[in-house]
Image: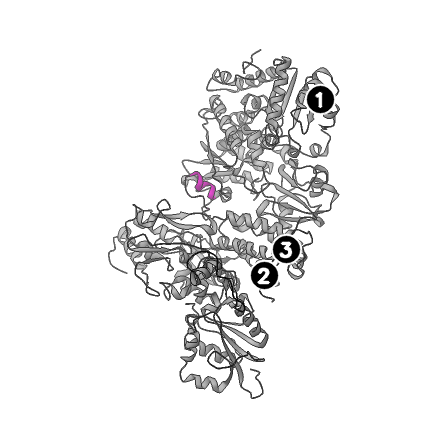
Amino acid sequence: MANLAGGPTAGTVKGEQSVMNVMNRQELLEMAQSELDRQNTFRCRLLICASTPCISSGALAVEDAMRKAVEAEGLQTEIEMVGTGCLGPCSRGPLVTVQVQEEPDVIYERVTVELAPQILAKHLKGASVPELDARMLSYDWPFFAKQKKLVLSESSTLNPERIESYVARGGYMALGQVLREMTPEEVCAEVAKSGLRGRGGAGFPTGLKWDMVRKAPGERKYVVANGDEGDPGAYMDRTLMESDPQRVLEGMAIAGFAVGAEQGFIYVRGEYPLAAKRLEKAIRQAERRGLLGSRILDSKFNFRIDIRMGAGAFVCGEETALMQSIMGRRGQPVPRPPYPANRGLWGGPTLINNVETFGNIICIILKGADYYASFGTDKSKGAKIFALAGKVNNTGLIEVPIGITLREIVYEIGGGIRDCRPFKAAQTGGPSGGCIPAEHLDAQMDYETLQKLGSIMGSGGLIVMDDQSCMPDVARFFMEFCMDESCGKCGPCRGGTVQMHRILSKITNGSAIMEDLDTLEDLCLLVKETSLCGLGNTCPNPVYSTLRYFREEYESHIKDHYCPAGVCQFTEKPLRSA
Amino acid sequence: MATSTNSKARLATVWLGGCAGCHMSLLDLDERIVDLLALVDLVYSPVADIKKFPEGVDVTLVEGACCNSDNIHMAREIRLKSKQVVSFGDCAITGNVPGMRNRLKVENILSEVYADGPGPAPPAQGGLPVLLAKVLPLHQVIPVDVYLPGCPPSPERIWLAVTAMLKGEPVELPAEMRTLG
Amino acid sequence: MSVVTLTIDDKLVSAPANTSLLSSIQEQGIDIPTLCHLKGLSERGGCRLCVVEMEGNPRLFASCVTPVAEGMVVRTNTAKLLKYRQMMIELLMAQRNHVCAVCVQNGHCELQTLAAKLGVTSVRYDYMCPDLPMDASHERYVIDHNRCILCARCIRVCDEVEGAHTLDMGGRGVQSRVIAGMNQPWGTSRSCTGCGKCVQVCPTGALFKKGSSAAEMVKQHDFLTWILDGREKKIWHWR
């Protein structure tokens, strides 16, 4: 039995060098099999979530403690320790999954350094550890059971730093299938048939976009993955890039084949060093095995991917600004048309999708468009990743079928509001989105419904608020964010965000008069309708939607200097009475 | 326009934080001053020796920005006692030249001007109005009905605006007569 | 060259394909406000004053960066557009320290003229009164950031016509500022040729000749057409 890694824990470098540069399908299958065989040599596998949230709650120390325990027992050949991608319930980290052969997997939450050796004792020696039993998470727990993982399907068991781990779970089979059996038209048609829509927020039909780039005339075309996730509280893209980087790369390569591009860029937010590191490693490993680069999988298709790091500007998540940034220019939006599909990077037709969109491609190709389209609603297919945050009992990253109701997310997956307080609103879409009040708890989470309610699907931020949240204050928070992040190119957004923020500050400090509310509403409309790019077009949404559903709260701030949530301190007085 | 007992409109002009240039421009109406006075009673003005702002004023022209607590107090009194308030000239409308101090801290200005250089401001003596942290345009302190821009507004602008108001007509200055500056 | 027909303010007009909607509108003699647009420079689409309504589309379009298209039906002067344009001017005036009375360009300023034309006689927003410097390090010209509206005409003319690219934009949002070189005193920039094109295209008193006093600065834009006509069409007379 070939052990590619050469040893249980170290030695991947040696393994990498022994592989030839060009790989065909047969060799890919062999690589998958040998990795599975290697994994099967272990009696037990300890999977420690190595995503940023778990790392920040101490996963590395836990891993270290476990490793020491394994070594102390001399069990290195029997137990494999794997740093994996994200499991989801991030507030309960560090999370450890125990896989013992012939036994169901067990997940532990909030594992401490002290408890780490106890896991070995419990699973290998049958010791009774009540403390651990109390920390077991059941797969029947609604947080897991209500999810449908199409993109993050493998992330909780993969080692994101080893390509073998990805290949063993069917990685690069989709690309192989596309290269061998499909034409670019067919790929675009399949994606279109799946009903997949852009996961960056706007929800443009992905298949249609791919076909536009495919048909656009141009010698050089480009594929860009947008990983510049900037919404406060959102970390879907980071998790995907950290947990399953190869999936994004494979999706991009399939897109490259479909549209006729040989160069891809993945634009990673500057604040995501771990994602960038893992992607870089993933690219290098894929290139070394001929899964990226020239003559991929022994075909005529060439595709290279390079990483570009952002430098902290939120607006670079806007596609035209992002492309300017990739080209080394000032990261500012430029007017459309021309659309990127016709003239993007260096004048060439450019396909730009969110990393999560690319993450969906593998499922569509491997399981078929019909399977994919069996999830979701009429107009919005598949599943969507949300970063569930705020005042719910279970926060974390969830992937749910589109069309699930907000109530299911809050009360089943989220386990209800903390301290049994009442639900007040959910904010979707971050600074570009809006608030959904309690009366719409049964609304379906899909592109159209959310838009009708004055919010947007957005990239997937979902912040749940209870009665201790003050809506004008929430609106002020998001407006402050937009004001700081406005690039300053167009007048309405540059000046409008500042003035809207000023009025919201006045409302929350007691110096506003009712007339200011009209001025605020006018500004919302101005900035929304006349701004140059999506940042400006959507940044009034948090204000507008809270005004729509919680107008009486604004009025009580202004007229009575009373904040129902008890958040605002009214330290100022209005200068003018009317 | 509805007027008081002697059927003449009651006009007031007020000088807040400004250079009096707008009042000079008013006087530059020259012989039309006589025509104006045929239409109005000047019930309060820096050019007339009247100590208290009277009740029941029809039109008040307010020159100057609100720079101190006394200006605020005066502005509020004007609003209470006037049917129509005019922001008379750029200072009242934008803060203009007095407002150029707004980028600086008020304590620093006081010590720079009255003491020697940056440092704590000299202690305020009783009875003096307090300088505002920021010079404010009039409409941020009280609601304003008509804006008469210019630094100063030319006599022609003043004549057009005031006569229109006295006739009860809306003030509609042509574009070239409503420039700031 | 193919031609498209479109309707501008109820009037059927034709225009060469691939031209901007703004040029068609101006050709009709319609007085549409612009600030960042200047004939001879690339379009920026930044000031948004030239927005128009498009039938069948809820969005507004900045006409300078919208190509004409067959069957387009646009309105250039509705009550909503006027209101928005007034608000945009007011936002600009509230952003920096525009004190017309003491400005070198008083009486010749595009912002001041547009405000009057659009009926902006007061600003409903709070003045931001930023503490901005003035750079007088250049031997012939001065930049006063207090009067800058960030239209970037200076940046574009420096790059596109003079080819020096001394000026660019630094910072972001409301903190954006026109910078010289690597954000250094203008006078120390080695790429500046001192040509003064930036000064001439500036719509306000932000860029001016040293020694100008209040209301003395009058700017000339026609040099731009002259240079570009000469370069591109070999026409060498003032038009």
Q: Earlier in the sequence, mark 3 or mark 2?
A: 2
Q: Chain of mark 1?
A: A
Mark 2 lies on residue: A516
Q: Residue furthest top?
A: A1
The amino acid at mark 3 is Leu
**SS at mark 3?**
helix
- Which residue is disc 3 drawn over? A547
Disc on res. A80? none
Q: Amino acid at mark 1?
A: Pro
Q: Position of residue C71 (x, y in %)?
A: 48, 55
Q: Earlier in the sequence, mark 1 or mark 2?
A: 1
Q: Residue furthest left?
A: C236
SS for callout 2: helix
Coordinates of residue C171 in the picture (x, y in percent)? 44, 47
- Depth order, front residue of C72/A125: A125
> What distance separates the C-alpha of mark 1 from that of mark 2?
61 Å
Residue A184 is at least partly visible in this image: yes
Q: Which residue is mark 1?
A: A104
Depth check: give the residue in front, B146 or C72.
Answer: B146
Give the answer, above or below, for where A386 lies relative to A283: below
Q: CA distance from mark 1 to mark 3?
A: 50 Å
Q: Quadrant of the C terminus of chain C?
A: bottom left
Which residues are drawn in magenta?
A: A320-332
